[in-house]
Amino acid sequence: MDYKALKAKLDEKVFDLAEAKRELLTHLAVREAGGAAGGRIPCLVGPAGVGKKTLVRALAEALGRKLLILPVDGHGLTGKTPVYGKSKIGEVVGRLIHLLNQNRGQDLVVLVDGMESISPAFQREVPMGFMEVLSLSHDYAMQLKHIDEPLDFSRVLFFAAASDIAFIHQELLAGLELVLINGYGDEQKIAIARGWIIPFAAADCGLAGQVELSDGVIFTIIRRYTNEIGLVHLSRLLRKLMRCLVLETGGSGQVKVSEADLPHLLGAPQFDFTRARTGSGVGIISTLGRSGGHGVLADLEVALVPDDNPSVILTGNMDSLFREVVMVAITCIRQRTGTLKLPLDFYRRYTIHCNGMPAGVLKSGVSAGLAVFLAMVSALANRPVPADVSALGEISLSGQVRGVAGVHEKALAAYRLGIKKVFFPAANEPEVASLPPEVRRDLALVAVSTVEQAASLLFADSANDKGQTTEGF
């Protein structure tokens, strides 16, 4: 197999994703060489719209194989991912065997989409890999004469896709070769829109070569009409734009779209890409989380209320794990009141009220630990925090800032939403290195290893902005 020619064909069809392409080509090479690792199924993991299906479809075309996509996910009205057990696995495998039987004798590429929805509890709760279940069901179908001849699985290239690695069952992970696909920056989205989405959308509406969209217009659509790290909503909006242009112009002549035309064609903007707070505030800092596979921004407020019977109050939809994060931050500060020049008995004098906004979003996880610590120090020391600063990282009682998951998505969210500086765990530096160039250029990413280091850097910056001294930090 000519892998250089194969890569060239993938590059024609799919923008960037160099690491994911290399992983898939490596899998094919190992499989062709007869290596044991070739028996694992490559599973592309990433949020919606990052190119998982597109990449597998391009690979199938490059190999000259027919592609079969078997969706097994099914998001309910609650937005939660359902986890299917024995009956659903039987249904999925039955559909797959039926498809393979229909396409008998062909070289196929099969994409099983939605692996996070499959629970491997099968046949009296015995954990089994998906391929083992497939083989069992195939043998069962043979015994009952559902198919006349055995199927040749060796002629099938299996791939899988999932939106979040956290929801893939541990038993299934053993049989999967994970291929992580992260989101895109604005410049990458503009390049993809100009090179792929717009030409196809225009051609589908009979406007091939007739529509002129500047980078500024595309940027405005990205920032003010979408909030994603993938391309699902951007593609939908560009297709809608083309349909509206056909209605407006009758599909004849050249059309130039300006930013002023967008509210008329696409409606009022849905997002404000400068959503970070303005100015500085005491006891408030932005923190970054993850929801639906993409990063989200939340504000964390800390207020100190003089009280003869002090306590800790948590509001803003915080769960029990977040409460533990707050308790760790309080103890961390109590151990360092001398270093930080804070009142020694603050926990005896004040009720500490910690509030998260927006309240409609559940606050959970440990990655806000550093933000909680810095917001409390800000409130106790009466030191303002710039509105365009955010922090993430788990903290320990010893003051260490530990690595967290999803830094790539969270950094992209910070970049989209007007944050200019992010304090993050030094352990996550390799993940930060893979961010798009424009994000690394425009977003100050500050790696820290301890809470003292983070406080020193944050409040030194804010003090320098006001011409103050930084003693104690």
Image: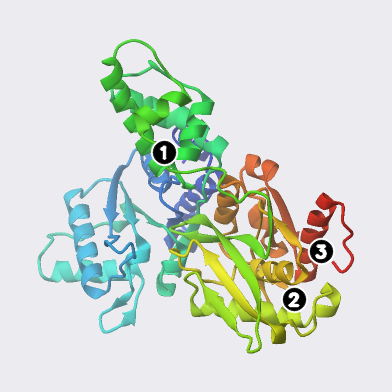
Residue picked out by circle 2:
399
In the rendering, at what x and y percent does residue 376 appear? 69, 71
Quarter occupied by the C terminus: bottom right
Residue picked out by circle 3:
456
Q: Neighbour class for label 2 at 10 Å: few (<14), some, many (≥20)?
A: many
Residue 244 lies left or right of residue 418; in this view the side is left
Query: What amino acid type should be assigned to the residue bearing mark 3?
Result: Ser
Nearer to me, 65 or 396: 396
* Residue at the limit of the structure toward the top, as seen here: 253
Residue 181 lies left or right of residue 262; in this view the side is right
**Is residue 361 in sight in this rendering?**
yes
Compared with residue 337, is residue 73 higher up or lower down, i.e. above or below? above
In the rendering, at what x and y percent does residue 379 appear? 71, 69
Picture residue at 72% right of the left edge, 62% below the top: 426
* Residue at the limit of the structure toward the left, as seen here: 145
Q: Neighbour class for label 3 at 10 Å: few (<14), some, many (≥20)?
A: some
Residue picked out by circle 1:
234
> What secondary structure is found at the residue carrying circle 2?
loop
